[in-house]
């Protein structure tokens, strides 16, 4: 019998082609986590995303014994959205049109993604996942707006997708092409996201990234974001 702490993940299962579940470990003992992993294996799950707070020593021990990979030190940053005049850089505009360059930017945004770094997942998995993320953002199914920074030549050198999560405006994908870094493209995109969030009436803007992505964390702090949550995500393979 599957423990109720394991949540089947339909989208991930369909995308990866095998059963994937999420295990919330906080509040569970080492023995309970071990039992949940064993039950998940018997229930036919192949992969568990085990979520734990950084201070959860029981989870770290039990999941290490189960051979799990600490795949992501997931961090959430948030900042208040201040109302008032907020000019947007002329190089930035909204788009719903796909282009290969936008797809390249989407891939660049996931350099530290756990789906890229897990050696059990083929590189094609990461790229297809982020391509779908971009397409679903452009169609409006998971984002309210996609912002692009264009050079005078028309080349798309920056990408930001903006939606909603947990009552906050939420930055999904954010990337600046390697050729344009150091030119404040990222800061301009974040400023545009703040302005749009204010226009939509949100009080806060958030972004989720990887704690191991130190350049991104420093960038968000420089933009005025503050760390509000951290959790560890383990990949526990059951085959």
Image: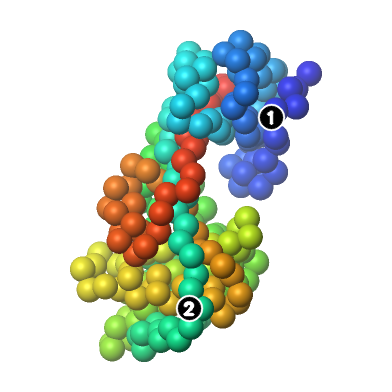
The residue to which callout 2 is attached is 195
Q: Find residue 78 and report its horizontal and vertical position in percent.
A: 47, 57
Around disc 2, counting alpha carbons within 10 Å, would you say few (fewer than 14), some (14 to 19), or many (20 or more)? many
In the image, what residue occupies the spot 52% across and 17% down? 58
- Tell which residue pokes out farthest to the top in this image: 31
Q: Quadrant of the C terminus?
A: top right
Does the rendering let one see residue 231? yes
Q: Is residue 96 left or right of residue 88?
A: right
The quadrant in which residue 32 appears is: top right
Residue nearer the viewer, 212 or 27? 27
Give the residue pinned by disc 1: 6
The furthest residue to the right: 1
The percent coordinates of residue 99 (x first, y second) are 45, 75
Give how far across and how far down residue 170 sits, in percent. 53, 62
Dot 1 alpha-carbon crowd within 10 angstroms: few under 14, some 14 to 19, many 20 or more: many
Evaluate if marks 2 and 1 touch, with contact meaning CB atoms under 8 Å apart: no
Q: Is residue 161 visible?
A: no
SS label for mark 1: strand
Q: Secondary structure at mark 2?
A: helix
Inter-mark Cα distance, 2 to 1? 39 Å
Q: Which residue is pictured at 60% across the width and 26% down the height?
A: 25
The picture places residue 40, in percent across and down from the top left corner, at: 67, 22
Camera-nearest label, 2 or 1: 2
Image quadrant containing the N terminus:
top right
């Amino acid at each position: 019998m599957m423990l109720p702490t394991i949540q089947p993940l339909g989208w991930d299962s369909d995308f990866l082609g095998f059963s994937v579940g999420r295990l919330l470990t906080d509040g569970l003992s080492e023995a309970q986590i071990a039992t949940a992993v064993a039950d998940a294996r018997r229930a036919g799950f192949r992969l568990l995303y085990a979520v734990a707070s950084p201070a959860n020593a029981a989870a770290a021990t039990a999941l290490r014994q189960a051979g799990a990979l600490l795949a992501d030190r997931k961090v959430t940053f948030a900042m208040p959205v201040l109302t008032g005049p907020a000019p947007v850089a002329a190089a930035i505009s909204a788009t719903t049109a796909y282009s290969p360059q936008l797809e390249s930017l989407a891939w660049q945004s996931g350099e530290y993604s756990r789906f890229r770094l897990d050696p059990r997942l083929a590189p094609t998995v990461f790229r297809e996942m982020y391509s779908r993320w971009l397409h679903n953002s452009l169609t409006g199914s998971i984002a309210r707006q996609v912002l692009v920074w264009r050079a005078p030549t028309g080349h798309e050198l920056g990408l930001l997708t903006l939606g909603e999560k947990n009552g906050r405006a939420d930055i999904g994908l954010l990337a600046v092409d390697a050729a344009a870094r150091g030119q404040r493209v990222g800061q301009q995109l974040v400023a545009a996201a703040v302005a749009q969030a204010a226009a939509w009436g949100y009080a806060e803007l958030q972004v989720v990234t990887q704690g191991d992505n130190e350049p991104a964390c420093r960038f968000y702090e420089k933009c005025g974001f503050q760390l509000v949550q951290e959790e560890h995500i383990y990949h526990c393979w059951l085959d």
